[in-house]
Amino acid sequence: MTLADILFTQGFGTRYDCRQIVFAGAVSINGRVADDPDENFEPKGLVLTWRGEEWPVCEKALIAMNKPEGYECSLKPSAHPSVMGLLPGPLRKRAVQPVGRLDWDTTGLLLFTDDGKLLHRLTHPKKHVDKVYLVELCHPMAPDTCEKLLSGVVLDDDPKPVCAKAARMLAPERLELTISQGKYHQVKRMVAACGNRVAKLHRIRVGSYELPENLEPGKWVWLSGPEAVLGGGGR
């Protein structure tokens, strides 16, 4: 496949745009500036360098971001800027989407993909993908808080109790909570059902993928594929 066509498949713009990017010497491969848009390469396993950043060529993109506070996960935000603005143009062009949503004031691990099947696998309520949060509370926890969360609490719009998969007190006002559902404002509402309030919420894991400690807020990294999140089972 020609280099210009490879760039086109990766969201770098129109075919004309991609040819101009190559002519400008903006793409390197294996340390060599690739300035011929008609040069052929095998796309599988190819890693480009664009604007000083490595860019693995992939049929479907999957990335992980450390979402900062103050951004909405909506493609059409209302009160705060969209988290999509933190991504480079090619990823937006190829229409990656957030996998689920984090509230504007919630931070931590947020996945993006343009793989529709994977998006469904990670977000469908019946798939029960674990999500782990660090929760800072407004008040010290009651002694039976973890027990209540594990046995199930009733949210204000659903008579059926919702259970945490795991709950561990880290400090009187700090909790590690694992859920496998994806209800609206679920963690905040579960905590409220226990007579407390969430002061800060930070997601650290989705499925088997844990947010790297050295990934700064607003930064993102490529993931190798679905197995990075779903484990050895892949899809």
Image: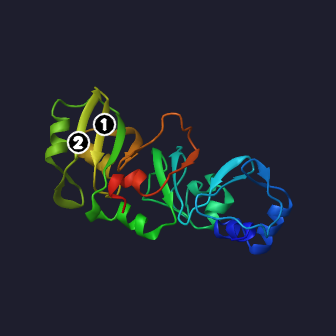
What crowding class fits label 1: few (fewer than 14 Cα within 10 Å), some (14-19), or many (20 or more)?
A: some
Instruction: Tell me, for residue 193, which label it has, or none.
Output: none
The mark tally for this picture is 2
Determine the CA span between mark 2 and mark 1.
Answer: 8 Å
Q: Position of residue 19 (x, y in %)?
A: 80, 68
Establish if 139 lies above or below 14.
above
Q: Residue 218 appears in which quarter of the rendering?
A: top right
Q: Position of residue 127 (x, y in %)?
A: 28, 62
- Residue at 16% in and 49% down: 152
Left or right: residue 118 compared with residue 95? left
Left or right: residue 192 compared with residue 98? left
Establish if 22 lies above or below 174.
below
- Residue at 20% in and 43% down: 149
Q: Quadrant of the N terminus?
A: bottom right
What crowding class fits label 2: few (fewer than 14 Cα within 10 Å), some (14-19), or many (20 or more)?
A: some
Instruction: Tell me, for residue 166, which label it has, or none.
Output: 2
Q: Earlier in the sequence, mark 2 or mark 1?
A: 2
* Mark 1, residue position: 176
- Residue at 53% in and 34% down: 214
* SS label for mark 1: strand
Q: Position of residue 119 (x, y in %)?
A: 42, 64
Please name the amino acid that badge 2 sits on. Ala
Please name the amino acid that badge 1 sits on. Glu
- Residue at 36% in and 47% down: 208
Question: Residue 206 versus residue 163: which sits nearer the camera?
Answer: 206
Q: Position of residue 7 (x, y in %)?
A: 70, 65
* SS label for mark 2: strand
C-beta proximity under 8 Å, tags 2 and 1: yes
Question: Residue 128 versus residue 222: which sits nearer the camera?
Answer: 222
